[in-house]
Amino acid sequence: MPKERLSVVVTRRLPEAVETRLCELFNVRLREEDTPMSRQELVEAMKTADVLVPTLSDAIDAPMIAQAGERLKLIANYGAGVDHIDVESARQRGVLVSNTPGVVADDTADMTMAMMIGAIRRVPEGLRMMDKGEWTGWAPNALLGGRLGGRRLGILGMGRIGQAVARRASAFGMQIHYHNRRRLRSEVEQSLEATYWESLDQMVARMDVITIHSPHTPSTFHLMNARRLKLMKPDAYLINTSRGEVVDENALVRMLKAGDIAGAGLDVYEHGIEINPDLLKLDNVVMLPHMGSATVEGRLEMGEKVIINIKTFDDGHRPPDLVVPAML
């Protein structure tokens, strides 16, 4: 008899090609609406499925995992970050967790550079002027920004995305500095022409731009807190395309309003879609709706990784992108 297909529940609408391939391989229940599942819907899905395919909009905590059915053996996350999943609780219950690392590093690095350029060159102010019909023509002193070339860039988190940003920023003539949990191998450091700082405080105080590429973990929550933000130079910029929880958003808003730092570029926010209303009123902030990884190519590749992880598991092997608590 043919082997029974795995029961797979997908929590959000995915690219059509990904959904089609999943349906060809497994017994799949797709999401009709492109909205997050409720907490109860997620629990019900975990009670009946062999594999759950969640996204970063699905918070899966220990009490939810405790209600999972005996069939659930794999949470194949559609995305690299897994801070929304209690990986340790899943492991204790015998549920594997996989993710999709490395797929959107270039996409996110591209967006980081776009936000950096946007903030330093005052692009949002120019756009607002055009939208309101206030532009009266070219003027020598109008909307003067600055050059990227020659500025010191401090990269907080030198993984795949951080290194991709370093390569791009170097091409713009920026000087590359970084702080990381572990120092890079000397040959990698040399290829990036990057200066390592063991002390994050010392790096932050000397940089013209700080860009954050760190996951959200208990140790990185408010890593850029009020004290550390105050170390930044008054003409420095903060860019965040990683996780909003890494920055104390209220402290950042206070400093931006007071002119204690020059500006910021934010693609993520500490409280998700509940954005501090004062941020929306500031001219010196580039704000985007968490679209750093939003490319057609990236979303398809993420889906391919999800499928490979599930298929490898179904074949009786360890998923290639297995997440273990020690990695976090």
Image (tube, grey):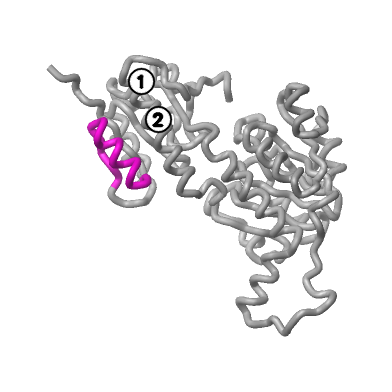
Image quarter where the N terminus lies is: top left
The tally of labels here is 2
The residue identified by callout 1 is 313
Seen from the viewer's position, the closer of residues 47 and 205 is 205
- Judged from the image, the secondary structure of the residue bearing numbered disc 2 is strand
Seen from the viewer's position, the closer of residues 55 and 102 is 102
Q: Looking at the rendered structure, which numbered label has been put on residue 76?
A: 2
Residue range in magenta is 14-31
- Judged from the image, the secondary structure of the residue bearing numbered disc 1 is helix
- Work out which residue is located at the far left of the displayed protein and give it: 1
Q: Quadrant of residue 120?
A: bottom right
16 is within the stretch colored magenta: yes
Image position of 224 (left or right of 109): right
- Cα distance, mark 2 to mark 1? 10 Å
Q: Quadrant of residue 44?
A: top left
Q: Residue at x 84, y 74 (%)?
A: 141
Q: Residue at x 41, y 29 (%)?
A: 63
Amino acid of disc 2:
Ala
Image position of 176 (left or right of 319): right
Image position of 185 (left or right of 87): right
Q: Position of residue 55 (x, y in %)?
A: 43, 40
Q: Position of residue 84 (x, y in %)?
A: 49, 35
Image position of 297 (left or right of 205): left
